[in-house]
Image (spheres, rainbow, N blue to C red):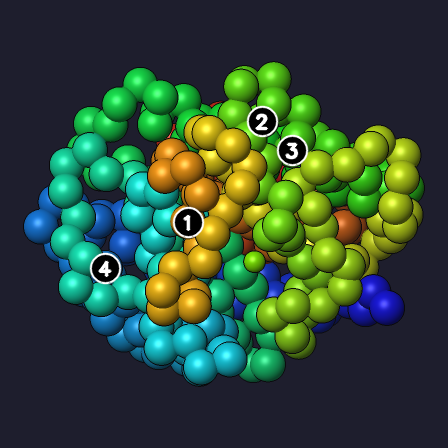
Amino acid sequence: MIQLKTPEEIDRMAAAGRILARCHEILRAKARPGVTTGDLDGAAERFIRSQGGESAFKGYRGFPGSICASPNSMVVHGIPGSDTLKRGDILSIDIGVVLDGWVADAAITHAIGNVTPIAGRLLATTRAALFDAVEQTRAGNRLGDVSHAVQNRVENDGFAVIRSLVGHGIGREMHEDPQIPNFGEPGTGPELEEGMVLAIEPMVNVGTHHVQMGQDNWAVYSQDGSLAAHFEHTVAVTADGPRILTPWHELLGTGVAPAAASA
Ligand code: MG
């Protein structure tokens, strides 16, 4: 069952989302060659706590980190630690913040210094797929319109949508109904209604769509070892259209977000 949120509840989720967006801004500035993913995790933990929030990830099913930090062929759920960033890496950082019982969730894949042209294209496509999907997150549309927007952008650009990992509804719980695949048919699935809040998160491989679990039973890798990217926003369906509750794109200021996607 999809839990609808009132405008006041959406405002409270947006307060969590603002902290989250600022945390992404801080981590992007720190994500340089020689820094470990554990360093980033510590910085995130300190910042989120300084704002009166908590990590939504720490302790979730026993996850030990405050963030997920997933380099190169790792798609998601990387445990932060002694991995040291190198020039030319890509790094996906996923952050969840709980504030006053409401959760926000958002991810970005960063280039660490200059990256290969294919890595640059992967990041640009995955980010664009997220904003294409946000644009579809409107009352009266169907969930399949959101899913299809991701698939269409990714496959037109020659990359692969990961099938076995999905976005999700979000609110008092990090994972609520509905599940949001990154592929689908337009005009299918549940109708979007005002008050729905969705964590939309394209996860994309350069190679095939297959993934495999790492030895720690958390990290998920592309099965063929190709690079993977992950971009995510928490988005509310409102009377005024899609409202992004985790506005990292406004703070990081790279690329072009559609006008309708402003917070
Ligand atoms: Mg998520």
Whichever of labels 1 and 4 marks the residue nearer the N terminus, that label is 4
Whichever of labels 3 and 4 marks the residue nearer the N terminus, that label is 4
Quadrant (top left, top right, bottom left, bottom right) of the N terminus: bottom right
Image height of 40 relative to 185, above or below: below
Image height of 175 relative to 198, above or below: below
Q: Is residue 258 visible?
A: no
Q: How far is disc 3 from disc 1 in space, using C-alphas?
A: 20 Å
Residue 59: mark: none
Report crowding for label 1: few under 14, some 14 to 19, many 20 or more residues within 10 A (C-alpha). Answer: many
Residue 150: mark: 3
User: Considering the numbered disc 3 on the image, is that residue within a helix, a strand or a loop?
Assistant: helix
Residue 221: mark: 1
Looking at the image, which residue is at 90% across and 34% down? 187
Marks 3 and 4 close (CB-CB < 8 Å): no
Image height of 123 relative to 165, above or below: above
Whichever of labels 4 and 2 marks the residue nearer the N terminus, that label is 4
Looking at the image, which residue is at 89% across and 50% down? 190
Q: How far is disc 2 from disc 1 in space, using C-alphas?
A: 18 Å
Name the quadrant containing residue 65: bottom left
Q: Nearer the viewer, residue 103 or 155?
A: 155
Whichever of labels 3 and 1 marks the residue nearer the N terminus, that label is 3
Ligand 1's quadrant: bottom right
Residue 37: mark: 4
Looking at the image, which residue is at 67% across and 58% down? 168
Label 2, on which residue? Answer: 154
User: How far across and down, in percent of the image, does residue 230 sit?
Assistant: 47, 44
Q: Looking at numbered disc 1 in the image, what kind of residue is underneath it?
A: Tyr
Q: How far is disc 3 from disc 2 in space, using C-alphas?
A: 6 Å
Q: Is residue 70 visible?
A: yes
Q: How far is disc 1 from disc 4 in space, using C-alphas?
A: 17 Å
Q: How far is disc 3 from disc 4 in space, using C-alphas?
A: 28 Å
